[in-house]
Image: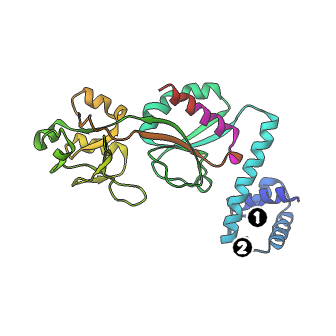
Amino acid sequence: MDRIETMRLYVRIVERASFAQAARDLMIPRPTASHAIQKLEADLGVRLLERTTRTVRPTLDGKIYHKNCVQLLAELDEMENAFRNPEPRGQLRVDLQGTIARFFIVPALPAFMARYPQISLKLSEGDRMVDLIEEGVDCVVRAGELSDSTLVGRRINAFEQGTFASPDYLKRFGTPKTLDELKGHRMVGYAASATGQPYPLEFETKGGLREVALEHDIVVQGAEIYTASALAGLGLIQVPRYRVLEQVTAGLLSPVLDAFPPPQMPVSVLYPEVRHLSPRTRVFVDWLVELFSAI
């Protein structure tokens, strides 16, 4: 067996936790499979698999080798498929920030799927940094400033933000007209995913950006519960205006301090370096840029 065939065999053994089942899947003799893995371990100088009478499982080195094999074989398959059939195809795995997905991306997906019928989608929702290789994700869409990352970040939009509170809250605490009048007010704390500490409120002034950390009775992590907390009268929040347009129109939330808006919230798509970008990921990223340029 050549090295590529051996790598495919190794991946199948790890997946099936069995030499016999992997050999049966690949239609090769069981002794051939055993000999190929022994030779692979000898060539690498490490033990990849722990073997017992009942099961087979990868060692620590074996787990690392398995992850790299999966990535390498996927790239090889992508390259060969690109020559066999230039139309992007296969499963595209995308992790999306929830409200952006609900308001913009998911409603437009029928157009994407009609344009690329050979691509199937697997979507998940999150708001944390994702190890794309480890978790098997092709790209992520995130709101906010990007932290240091090994991923490539491409900004696709920036949303206007505002400060909002419920009428009940403003009745109890008053409606501030200046930043100095925020003294005594409360905010709904939104926890940073990296530290768990709530972000301060931010306001753009003639003198530059001003941060105001107010007292808070609740700290949340998640866009929907953040807005729900403001609707319940628990404090001031700062969110993109599109997200609460319905609630403002219905009189459930009121904008405050419009003369001192928060900075715009950037929206970005992140993916591995370009040389690892599959055709289906590339067309999805380009489609996102096209979609958000029209918003």
Residue drawn at x 37%, y 59% is 196
Residue that mark 1 sits on: 19
Which residue is drawn at the image coordinates 69% and 70% (left, top)? 61
Q: Decide if residue 38 is on the left or right side of residue 205.
A: right
How packed mark 1 is, by other alpha carbons closer than 10 Å (few <14, some 14-19, many 20 or more), is many
Residue 207 location, x and y as percent? 31, 44
What's the residue at 70%, 38% (across, down)?
279
- The x and y percentages for residue 284 are 61, 35
Question: The residue tagged with tag 1: helix, strand or loop?
Answer: helix
Decide whether the magenta segment is chiefly helix, strand or loop: helix
Q: Does the magenta portion include 127?
A: no
Residue at point 47%, 52% (across, down):
128
* Of the image marks 2 and 1, the number of the one nearer the N terminus: 1
Residue type for callout 1: Phe
Residue at the disc numbered 2: 51
Q: Look at label 2 and name its amino acid.
A: Arg
Q: Is residue 181 left or right of residue 228?
A: left
Left or right position of 149 against 39: left
- Name the foreground residue: 165 vs 63: 165
Q: Is residue 284 visible?
A: yes
- Pointers 2 and 1 in contact (C-beta within 8 Å): yes
Left or right: residue 125 compared with residue 236: right
Q: Position of residue 214 (x, y in %)?
A: 23, 53
The range drawn in magenta is 276-288
Q: Spatial distance from mark 2 to mark 1, Cα to Cα?
A: 10 Å
Quarter placement of the N terminus:
bottom right
Q: Residue furthest right?
A: 1
